[in-house]
Structures are given as C-alpha cells and as structure tokens.
Image: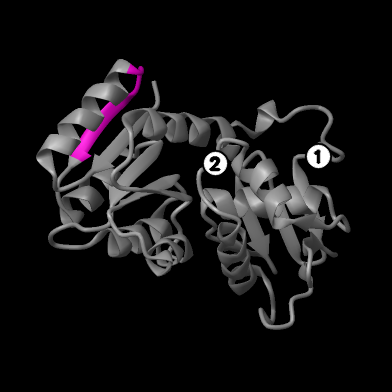
Amino acid sequence: MNKILVVDDDKNLLDVLKYNLVNDGFTVVTAEDGIQALEIARREKPDLILLDIMLPGLDGFEVCRILRKEMSIPILMLTAKTQEIDKVVGLELGADDYITKPFSIRELMARVRAMFRRSQWTEQQMPSTEPTAQSVLKADSLEVDVVGHRVFHKGTAMKLSPKEFDLLAFLMRHRGQVFNREQLVEKVWGYDYGGTARTVDVHMRALRRKIENNPVKPEYLITIHGFGYKFEG
C-alpha cells in the first residue's frame, strides 16, 4: 500500500483526512508541526506528503524547501490562503500541486489518486505510443534516466521535483514540438488537475535554473512567445 504523510496542526482535520485515506486503502502517518513532519518524512519515507502551509515551528514552505533538497517525494500543499503568490511560492519551492481550504474530501481524494496515477515512479507503464520509449534521454550534456528517475547535467546529478522531472522528460520525448500551457497541463498533470496553467510557468523557471547554463537565455527549454514551450537539443 502507498504510504501518505499528512501534516496539519488542525487535529480534527488530521483525523478526518487519516480516516478517509485509510478507508481508501492508503497507509497514513501524521504530524502536527513542521519539525515533526521532517522527522517522520525522513524515518517513514512516504510515497506522498499532504503538507499544510500554516504550521507551528517550521511552516510548510520551509518544510517543503528542506524536503525537496533531500528526497523526490510528491508534495501536495494544503493552504487556507487564496492569494496567487502563496501558490506560486509553494510550487517554486518544489511542491507538485496545491489545494485550497476549504476543500471537499472527494476533491482531495481525487487529487491524491491522480498524483499517484501520474507519478513517474511508474514510468515503466508509459503507453507504447510514446514517440521515444528509450530509458535514457540525452541532449548534449543533459541526460535523463527515465527508469532510475535521475537527471544529470554535465555529469552532475540534479535534484528535481517529481513534476519537474515529468515535465522535462515529456518535452525531451517530443523535442522540437511546441506545446501550449494547457496542453502541458493535460499531458503532464492530467485531465483532473485542479490547478492553473500558471503552474507550468513556475515549473519551467525552476527547471531552467537547474539545467540551463544561463536561465535567462535558455538553450534547451525554449519559450515560443504567444504560444508555449518546446525542447531543443
């Protein structure tokens, strides 16, 4: 069974989320503050983390930042804030998705199941219709090990979030082909993704900082103004 770490300082919500996730077949561990969340994540190595932003000790942003440096676990941020900047900050720190409180349990469960379905940790199940099914994608000094879920730039291993990896691998498989933001959301995040096309821009900026020699003048991840993005190389 997939293991989920749920982090929230609202004990009632924590109990409700645990009850529903367990009933849906998941193993669940919980934490009520940021420091405890780090300890449990390191010890339990969950397959997915539901992470509230407003936490005592360390807030969810800081927890996300630290965890993303240590492990490539999908992170779904829970936030009571509705400002776009809070969502963008979470994504830039490495979160893969977000859901705004108050949310329905049905919506959350659908989002959790979608994240597991789309996880690149099941890359071997990619449909055979993909134009390039090789396990290693290469472009100059950039190398993506699809099966091992690793990325190397000039021989150095790069730490990417799961969705950063998904986005890069998808574009490399379709190099030279231009996709608009809505198409990338559909292909990488899935039809049932509840976020916005702005998410693509945030992940693209993060990828450029990690794999481009000059993020301002990218060689691989090219913007086609007025339309979207493509991979060159």
Asked whether disc 2 touches disc 1, contact meaning CB atoms under 8 Å apart, the reply is no
Q: Amino acid at mark 2?
A: Tyr
Q: Secondary structure at mark 1?
A: loop
Residue sitting at x 41%, y 57%: 68
Left or right: residue 118 compared with residue 186: left
| Image position, residue 196 (x, y; %) | 55, 54
- Position above or below: 67 against 188: below
Q: Quadrant of the N terminus?
A: top left
Q: Amino acid at mark 1?
A: Gln
- How crowded pointer 1 is (Cα within 10 Å; few <14, some 14-19, many 20+) is rated as few
The residue closer to the viewer here, 231 or 148, is: 231
| Image position, residue 177 (x, y; %) | 87, 55
Q: Secondary structure at mark 2?
A: loop
Of mark 2 and mark 1, the one earlier in the sequence is: 1
Residue 220 in view (yes/no): no
Tell me, for residue 65, which label it has, or none. Answer: none
Left or right: residue 76 compared with residue 6: right
| Image position, residue 212 (x, y; %) | 69, 74
Which stretch appears magenta?
24-30
Residue 223 placement: quadrant: bottom right
Residue 57 placement: quadrant: bottom left
Residue indicated by mark 2? 193
- Position above or below: 183 against 198: above
Left or right: residue 3 compared with residue 55: right
Residue indicated by mark 1? 134
Residue sitting at x 47%, y 29%: 113
For the residues labelled 2 and 1, the Cα–Cα distance comes to: 27 Å
